[in-house]
Amino acid sequence: MFKQVTIIGFGLIGSSIARAIIERKQAETIVCVDQSKDVCQQVLAMGLADDATTDPSLGVEGSDLVILCCPVGAMDEVGGLISGHLQKDCIVSDVGSVKAAVIEMLRPRLPSYVHLVPAHPISGAEKTGPESGFAELFINRWCILTPLPDTELRAIEKVTKLWEAMGSMVEIMDAEHHDLILGLTSHLPHLIAYSVVGTATDLEDDIKSEVIKFSAGGFRDFTRLAASDPTMWRDVFLNNKPAVLEVLQRFTEDLTALQKAIRKGDGEYLYRQFTETRSIRPAIIEAGQADYLDADS
Amino acid sequence: MFKQVTIIGFGLIGSSIARAIIERKQAETIVCVDQSKDVCQQVLAMGLADDATTDPSLGVEGSDLVILCCPVGAMDEVGGLISGHLQKDCIVSDVGSVKAAVIEMLRPRLPSYVHLVPAHPISGAEKTGPESGFAELFINRWCILTPLPDTELRAIEKVTKLWEAMGSMVEIMDAEHHDLILGLTSHLPHLIAYSVVGTATDLEDDIKSEVIKFSAGGFRDFTRLAASDPTMWRDVFLNNKPAVLEVLQRFTEDLTALQKAIRKGDGEYLYRQFTETRSIRPAIIEAGQADYLDADS
């Protein structure tokens, strides 16, 4: 499908894409670009790429697809480094969790003869590094593409086919809409999880050890989110500020209302709220995004 | 081990206890008490009890162990109904998620010749009703006992052995300490989850359907908690008010600090916070309260 694919940033996502591309035979050659020499060597040793370099400008030469899998905060710099070295009709894509800011960074950098097709595979795990990737990471997961109004249809189709080949379901929407929806479904939950777990890490040691011991009651679910990559999430919050602050504001209002109900002993309000929220779970199970197996707490 | 065990309230927990007692042969006879006639009939049909009644005073007669598995808000009333019908040396226990309030309700109700051993098995699932219970629910889970200073050791030991026979690990602590720890590990996460999911249910229908679709990014984890039994959780918050408001206050302070950092673009603060919270996850996995399998988001 592609002659040569360059993956820039060989962490969990980058290395999983490499594995999936190899398994699904989507490229003749894979080039690894990573700022760490160790990672480059590791990737070659694991057979995840045919070539590896720490120099992005070198790594993208001759490629018909370049996927930026580096943290969102590095996209601007990487975009600048590769722009003069991309071949005509090369497709540039990424996997960043925010889309408007990434487009803002990359678009002015890239020459008009390449095709920008921003992407966001909604999948991840708490582990990082090239050794933690796996080819099945994207199976039955959504991948959202946020092409620009002037992106060529053929380029969008090629990226769509690649993600479908790796097992994903592809959805196309505009970048601002993506950032609002993901602000609610992903960025807000992570921020809250970081906050709850942060509250616990501030506790005295003896209480903290009990929190760990009895975490099955709900806290455990938050620790999974709060174990996500700090660099990635710092960049998400710095680059999706308006949407995150907007959903955070709504959340805070709702939480304050619940707090007030608890303080006043308003059982009726609590019961009504807790009943309404219940209906969304079966909808998620029906949508195939969860199953009863993760019901156990 | 017990001659006759009465279980009052045959929901998920009550029916799971019945199943585990039968499987581990911990009682000669099980009596079901449930306010719903339908549930009583269902329980008998499923063979989960030898006898069933909607009348608590009738149901506890002749039992050497009575376990209250009704919502915390009903304990006061049920305690009053059974108090005159308990046999000498009967052990009264419960499974409520708050302990100080339950003791406050039950202790004045119960005659001095019975033994109160409050308990809280830390396990649950999003489903309710007798048909959703299973005998394995308590295996490798903690069960916290919060006996009173004057509770007889022999009674504590009998309840400990029962929970161990059902597969649990038993920990003993005082009720106030339990309520604070669980306020953080269970009540706060549930309250926050209810709030986040509530924020989403307030959205317009088209956005809501996208939130469901792309829930795998973190939101999904919250919907599981927010699908918990509304009556049970209303009662938890009404009956653990001081501890919940205390941990909520701490959480809000921490969240506000993160919010401010996002607004100011303070990437250093965010990175530091996100790094500190990361360390708690391996500790939970090491403590056997989570495994890498639930790492996938």
Image (cartoon, coloured by chain):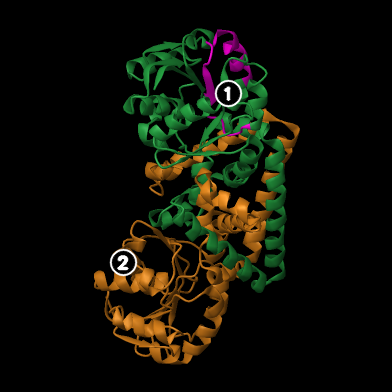
Chain colours: A orange, B green
Q: What element does badge 1 sit on?
A: strand
For image coordinates 72% across by 45% down, the residue present is: B246
> Is A192 displayed left or right of A111 in the figure?
right
For image coordinates 39% across by 70% down, the residue present is: A156
Q: Nearer the viewer, residue B11 or B18?
A: B18
Q: What quarter of the picture does the N terminus of chain B occupy?
A: top left
Name the kind of residue labelled 1 in the image: Leu
Q: What element does badge 2 sit on?
A: helix
Q: Nearer the viewer, residue B53 or A5?
A: B53
For image coordinates 50% across by 12% down, the residue present is: B60
Mark 1: few, some, or many residues within 10 Å (few <14, many ≥20)? many
Quadrant housing residue B272: bottom right
Quadrant housing residue A236: bottom right
Q: Position of residue B159 (x, y in %)?
A: 48, 28
> Is B57 displayed left or right of A284 in the figure?
right
Any magenta on residue A66? no
Which marked residue is nearer to the observer: mark 2 or mark 1? 1
**Which residue corresponds to mark 2?**
A135
How far apart, in angstroms, are the residues tagged by discs 2 and 1? 55 Å
Q: Chain of mark 1?
A: B
Q: Position of residue B154 (x, y in %)?
A: 51, 26
Q: Position of residue B168 (x, y in %)?
A: 43, 38
For image coordinates 65% across by 16% down, the residue present is: B109
Segment tinted magenta in the rendering: B76-99
Q: What quarter of the picture does the C terminus of chain B occupy?
A: bottom left
Q: Is residue A272 visible?
A: no
Q: Nearer the viewer, residue B161 or A88?
A: B161
**Which residue corresponds to mark 1?**
B116
Q: Is residue B223 above or below residue A171?
A: above
